[in-house]
C-alpha cells in the first residue's frame, strides 16, 4: 500500500528544555495526525493513551467513520447506499480490492469463494469434543484457530498467492463453521453448503434446513440478513480489528489472527453487545420497568450500562443503526411479529433514552447492536448466535485490514510501551527473613 498522507505542517513539544518537532499529516478526510514515531528519541518520553482514544495505529484506505456527522464509508461509498443497492459478496470484493467489481471480476471472485465453502471432513471431529451447551463463540475461536492445522499451503504470509487463498478460504468457510456450531448446539446433523446458492442464502440453509424435508430460503429474510452482514463488515480500527492487526504484525498465520479477532469481538462491550442488548431487553421485560433501568444506567455506583447504546466514535448517531432499524421493521412485518414485546420495549427505551438529558449530554445513542439483536431473534437465531453472525460478517473486514497491514511498508511488529509505577529495584529476601 503506497502512503497517501499529505504533509500539513509540524507540531512542537517543549518539556524541561527538551524540544521535539513532529510532522503533521492529513488524510482524505478526518482529523490531521501527528507523526510521533520519533517522539521517544527526540524527547526521551513516551506518549500515554490507554484505550487509544487519541491515537492512530495505522494509515488505512478501507473504511472511514465521521462520528460527529454519522458517516460510514466503505472504500468511499456510503453505507446506506451499499446496504440498499449492493450485496455482501460484491462489497467483500470492494473491501478486499478497493473498487467495485466488473461483472466478470465478480463472477470470478464469487466462484472462488463458492469453491472453498466446504471444510475438511476431519475438522468436524472438533465439534464432538465440545459440550452441547458450549457457547458457539468458544467453538468458533477453537475451530477457526485449528484451520492452520489443515491448510499448510496457505499460511506463508509473505507469499501473496497464499495470502489470497487463505483469505478466500477464511471468508468462504466462516458461514459453514458458524452454521455447524449452531447445528451442533441443537443436536441436528450438519448441512453441506450448496454451490447454487448465494453466500447468505447458503448460510441460512446450512442453519435451518433438515435432511427430512426440502428447505426454501425466504428471499425477504435472506435480503434482510444480507443487509445485516453488510452493516457489520468493517469499522476502522475497532478492538477486534486492532487485535487481528496486532497478531498479524508478529507474522502469525491468518487463521490464528482471525481466531484472535473472534476472541476480542466476543466481549460484551464490543461484538457481544447485540447478545447483551437482547438479554437486557428480556430482563427489562415490560415498558413500565424501563425507568428503573434508565436510573441504573445513570447510577455511577451501578456497573449496569444500557447495552446497545453509546459508541467510542459515533457521538450523534450510528448510521448503521438507521439502516438496521428499517431492516428490523421489514423482517418483523414479513414475519407478522411487529408486536413483538421485546420490540415494544426497545422502541420505548429508545424514545425515552433519546429524550433524557443524561443520554443527550453523554451523546449516547442506539448503536447497531440495539436493533440487530431483535432482528436476528426474529430470523430464528438463538441469542448466543448473534455475535457469531457479527464475526461471520466482520471476517471480511478483518481479512481486508490484515492484508493492508502486510502490504504496508511502514508497518512493523506492534509493541506498545508503558509508564511503570511499580516497586523500585530491590534485593530478594529469603523466606526465613521475611516478617
Ligand atoms: C461495537 O469500535 C467499534 O467500532 C465497535 C463497533 C464495530 O462495528 O466494531 O461499532 C461495534 O462494539 C458497538 C458498541 C457496542 N457496545 C455496547 O453497546 C455496550 C454499551 N456501550 C458502552 O459499553 C460504551 O458506550 C462503549 C464501550 C461502546 C463506548 O465507550 P467509550 O467511548 O469508551 O465511552 P465511556 O465508556 O468512557 O463512556 C463515556 C460516558 C461514561 O460516563 P462518565 O464516566 O463520562 O460519567 O458515558 C457513559 C459512561 O458511564 N456510558 C454509558 C453507556 N456508554 C457509555 N452509560 C450508560 N449506558 C451506556 N451504554
Image (spheres, helix red, strand yellow):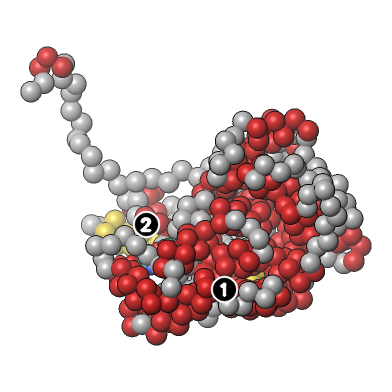
Residue at image mark 2: 49
Give the image quadrant in which the ligand numbered 1 is located.
bottom left
Q: Against 13, is 180 above or below?
A: above
Q: Which residue does the image show at 33% across and 83% down from the upper left? A: 357
Q: Which residue does the image show at 75% across and 42% down from the upper left? A: 190
Mark 2, other Cα within 10 Å: few <14 / some 14–19 / many ≥20: few
Mark 1, other Cα within 10 Å: few <14 / some 14–19 / many ≥20: few
Left or right of 161 in this view: 266: left
Going from N to C along the chain, the mark reached first, 1 or 2, is 2
Q: Which residue does the image show at 88% across and 51% down from the upper left? A: 195
Determine which of the numbered discs, if any, sits on residue 1 in the image. Answer: none
Q: Which residue does the image show at 41% across and 68% down from the upper left? A: 284
Left or right of 275 in this view: 158: right
Give the Cα separation between the discs numbered 1 and 2: 43 Å
- In the image, 137 versus 166, the foreground residue is 137
Residue 334 x/y as whole percent: 71, 75
- In the image, 312 versus 29, the foreground residue is 312
Residue 44 x/y as whole percent: 32, 49
Q: Against 58, is 406 above or below?
A: above
Residue 293 x/y as whole percent: 35, 70
SS under mark 2: loop
Residue at image mark 1: 340
Q: Against 51, is 27 above or below?
A: below
Amino acid at each position: 500500500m503506497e502512503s497517501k498522507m499529505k504533509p500539513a505542517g509540524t507540531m512542537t513539544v517543549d518539556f524541561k528544555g527538551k524540544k521535539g518537532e513532529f510532522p503533521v499529516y492529513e488524510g482524505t478526510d478526518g482529523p490531521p495526525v501527528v507523526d510521533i514515531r520519533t517522539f521517544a528519541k527526540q524527547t526521551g518520553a513516551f506518549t500515554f493513551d490507554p484505550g487509544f482514544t487519541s491515537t492512530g495505529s495505522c494509515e488505512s484506505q478501507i473504511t472511514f467513520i465521521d462520528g460527529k456527522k454519522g458517516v460510514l464509508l466503505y472504500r468511499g461509498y456510503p453505507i446506506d447506499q451499499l446496504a440498499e443497492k449492493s450485496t455482501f459478496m460484491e462489497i467483500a470484493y470492494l473491501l478486499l480490492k478497493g473498487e467495485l467489481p466488473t461483472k466478470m471480476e465478480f463472477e470470478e471472485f464469487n466462484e472462488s469463494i463458492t469453491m472453498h465453502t466446504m471444510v475438511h471432513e476431519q475438522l468436524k471431529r472438533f465439534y464432538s469434543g465440545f459440550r452441547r451447551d458450549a457457547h458457539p463463540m468458544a467453538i468458533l475461536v477453537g475451530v477457526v484457530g485449528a484451520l492452520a492445522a489443515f491448510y499448510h499451503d496457505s499460511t506463508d504470509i509473505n507469499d501473496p498467492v497464499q495470502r489470497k487463498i487463505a483469505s478466500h478460504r477464511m471468508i468462504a468457510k466462516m458461514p459453514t463453521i458458524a452454521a455447524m456450531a449452531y447445528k451442533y448446539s441443537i443436536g441436528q446433523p450438519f448441512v453441506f453448503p450448496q454451490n447454487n446458492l448465494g453466500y447468505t442464502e447458503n448460510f441460512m440453509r446450512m442453519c435451518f434446513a433438515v435432511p427430512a424435508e426440502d428447505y426454501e430460503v425466504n428471499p425477504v429474510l435472506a435480503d434482510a440478513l444480507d443487509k445485516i452482514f453488510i452493516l457489520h463488515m468493517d469499522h476502522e480500527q475497532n478492538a477486534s480489528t486492532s487485535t487481528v492487526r496486532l497478531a498479524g504484525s508478529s507474522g502469525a498465520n491468518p487463521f490464528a489472527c482471525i481466531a484472535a479477532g473472534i476472541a476480542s469481538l466476543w466481549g460484551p462491550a464490543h461484538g457481544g453487545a447485540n447478545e447483551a442488548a437482547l438479554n437486557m431487553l428480556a430482563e427489562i421485560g415490560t415498558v413500565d420497568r424501563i425507568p428503573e433501568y434508565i436510573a441504573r444506567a445513570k447510577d455511577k455506583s451501578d456497573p449496569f450500562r444500557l447495552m446497545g447504546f453509546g459508541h467510542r466514535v459515533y457521538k450523534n448517531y450510528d448510521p448503521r443503526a438507521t439502516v438496521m432499524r428499517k431492516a428490523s421493521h421489514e423482517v418483523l412485518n414479513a414475519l407478522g411479529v411487529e408486536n413483538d414485546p421485546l420490540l415494544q420495549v426497545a422502541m420505548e427505551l429508545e424514545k425515552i433514552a433519546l429524550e433524557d438529558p443524561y443520554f443527550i449530554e453523554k451523546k449516547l445513542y442506539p448503536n447497531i447492536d440495539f436493533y440487530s439483536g431483535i432482528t436476528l431473534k426474529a430470523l430464528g437465531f438463538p441469542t448466543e448466535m448473534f455475535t457469531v453472525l457479527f464475526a461471520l460478517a466482520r471476517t471480511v473486514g478483518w481479512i481486508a485490514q490484515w492484508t493492508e497491514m502486510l502490504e504496508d511498508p511502514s508497518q512493523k511488529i506492534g509493541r506498545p510501551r508503558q509508564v511503570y509505577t511499580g516497586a523500585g529495584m530491590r534485593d530478594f529476601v529469603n523466606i526465613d527473613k521475611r516478617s
